[in-house]
Amino acid sequence: MREHDTCRDHGGRRMKLSRRSLLATTAAVAASTIPAAQAQAAPEGRGRPPSTGFERLAADGYALLDGQRVGIVTNPTGITRDVRHIVDVMHADRRVNLVAVFGPEHGFRGTAQAGGSEGRYDDPATGLPVYDTYLKSGRPLADVFTASGVNTVVFDIQDVGARFYTYIWTLYDCMEAAALAGKRFVVLDRPNPVTGRESLGPVLHPEFATFVGRQPISQAHGMTVAELARLFNREFLTKPVRLDTVRMTGWKRSQFYDTSGLPWVPPSPNMPTPDTALVYSGTCLFEGTNLSEGRGTTRPFELLGAAGIDGRWADAAGALGLPGVHFREAYFAPTFSKFQNTTVGGVQIHVHDRAAYDPVRTGIALLVTAKQVWSDFAWRSDNWIDKLTGSTRVRTMIDAGADTDAVVAGWQEELAAFRKVRKEYLLYN
């Protein structure tokens, strides 16, 4: 079957995922295409880089946006390969009627730290009104879209492949709000920087839904934002949005970001490199503990530690023989966040074979061994770990003395169910 250059989804089958069951109903799905310049796929790390969704859109003369009043949800990652921001490019192009920008967590221009945004302002570079979407959803966010005067909302943000990275839930919330406001929605695709080979980890249980996980997908989802948009629209949105997805060409599911030839812009202040993204879906779990997850260092999520930890932790983790990774005894002093300006001990993660490396299993193993070797280990008092893992299971099993294999075995049934659904929405071979 020929793959379309652009996918349009006006609704369709909706399934509810749970730990032990998958209930489905079906409805009609329509699809359409737009013409776009083709790019040839190349061997990993060689040849022509992938063409992003924005590049495909621009190469087609923005035909998909013709006659539309356009608003765009984006941040500093919305760039061309010569690192111009797409808002600046589109604003200068008479073929696009760009009238508004919508900023997520950290803001459109990226000036805010974790848990912050830039608020409502007029962009000095373009004069465009910038609206804040952070922590807005449902009808309040739909009202923002209505007030902006747009009739098409475009989304272009680089994701990192983890369920608790909030930009995919900005995508979900904006799709839901656009449907409520009667707006059209267009997703411009970008690579999953840690590949799209497979999904890993526990699946969120619906009762633990928050902004770090709205719907039951796995902890490392193994999808691109366009693929997620298609899944969200047909599986989870009560009222599907009129959706177009502009896919990439030349991207392979086995491809890591540093082989793509595309420039990397940190999607958030504590995601400085693709190496950070590689470990993040596992070590972000340390946000749910009293250990530092490396914020305030040059290697966030690769450095982990606390006051009083010594080399026994690296020894215990290394003794497990986890594939693709080594653990080095490390000491560091975060400049902000936990243990600010205090020297702490812990580990640095060194991934030596990323094809074999399992970030979620590694994160669980580090939690298990940290609790074994450090008597002051504790979960955050708000049980944030449950929101990150999607249930109480990881916390309660580790507290009960379960080893890494037992914890990982606990989510395999729900993960298999999610993988089956995920497969229906993949756009790339």
Image (cartoon, rainbow, N blue to C red):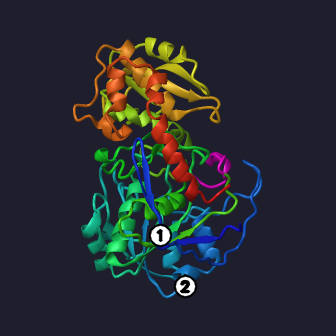
Q: Is residue 91 left or right of residue 388?
A: right
One can see residue 66 in this view: yes
Please determine whether, in this image, residue 60 is positioned above or below residue 208: below
Amino acid type, residue under disc 1 in the picture: Ala
Q: Which residue is mark 2?
A: 95
Residue range highlighted in magenta: 253-264
Q: Which residue is mark 1?
A: 27
Q: Is residue 210 magenta?
A: no
Identify the residue shown where x is 59% and y is 73%.
57
Pick the residue in front: 182 or 300.
182
Pick the residue in front: 383 or 53.
383
Give x and y (percent) for residue 221.
Answer: 50, 47
Query: Which quarter of the figure is the N terminus placed in?
Result: bottom right
One can see residue 299 in this view: no
> How crowded is the residue under tag 2: few (<14 C-alpha within 10 Å), some, or many (20+)?
some
| Front disc: 2 or 1 | 1
